[in-house]
Image (cartoon, rainbow, N blue to C red):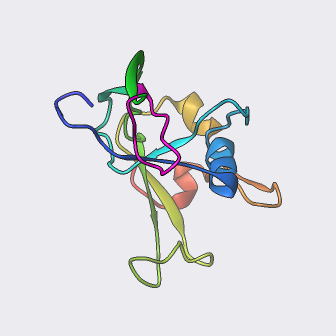
């Protein structure tokens, strides 16, 4: 990662964790793909490089002389923070949102009115919830 000299550990996702991560990313599950989870959160818009090693291991699980750099580097830019914050009531800090409470979004940047009209929430059954017009919320404009 840009600005950090040492490597950052990653975990290879397997099985149901892999499937869930790929679904969340709306990515196809191709058998030749490797899904990784980084153990560190990247700063917004950080430049990240993944340097792939030829990490064949001996039968005892230890690296041997075949462990070598094969020159593959994949470069990415980390996603910027979402332009909004989701606010909801919770039973405690670690709990999910109270399903009977109010949910609101606070945007951190100006939003085009047409973009605002396209925002909606969809529940597990597919029901869509659209925002109320500002005039009906009682909130200041």
User: Where's residue 78, x and y in %?
Assistant: 38, 31
Q: Does the magenta stretch include residue 68?
A: no
Vertical comparison of 125 with 31: above or below = below
Residue 100 is left or right of residue 7, and the answer is: right
Vertical comparison of 68 with 82: above or below = above
| Residue at 69% from the left image edge and 53% from the top image edge | 15
Q: Is residue 57 magenta?
A: yes
Quarter-of-image position of residue 32: top right
User: Where's residue 104, x and y in %?
Assistant: 49, 59
| Residue at 37% from the left image edge and 34% from the top image edge | 80
Q: What stretch is highlighted in magenta?
A: 52-65
User: Where's residue 8, x and y in %?
Assistant: 30, 42
Residue 79 is left or right of residue 35, and the answer is: left
User: Where's residue 61, x and y in %?
Assistant: 47, 50
Residue 107 is left or right of residue 24, and the answer is: left
Q: Residue furthest bottom?
A: 91
In depth, the one of 49 and 25 nearer the eye is: 49
In depth, the one of 135 and 72 nearer the eye is: 72
| Residue at 32% from the left image edge and 40% from the top image edge | 42
The rendered magenta stretch, by its main secondary structure, is classed as: loop
């Amino acid at each position: 990662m840009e600005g950090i000299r040492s490597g950052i550990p990653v975990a290879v996702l397997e099985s149901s964790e892999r499937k869930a991560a790929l679904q969340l990313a709306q990515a196809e599950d191709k058998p030749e793909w490797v899904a990784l989870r980084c153990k560190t959160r990247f700063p917004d818009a950080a430049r990240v490089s993944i340097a792939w090693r030829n990490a064949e291991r001996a039968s005892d699980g230890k690296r041997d002389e075949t462990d070598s750099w094969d020159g593959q580097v994949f470069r990415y830019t980390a996603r910027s923070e979402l332009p909004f914050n989701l606010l909801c009531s919770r039973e405690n800090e670690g709990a999910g949102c109270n399903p009977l409470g109010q949910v609101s979004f606070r945007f951190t940047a100006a939003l085009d009115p047409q973009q605002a009209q396209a925002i909606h929430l969809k529940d597990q059954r597919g029901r869509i919830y659209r925002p109320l017009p500002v005039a009906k919320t009682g909130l200041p404009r």
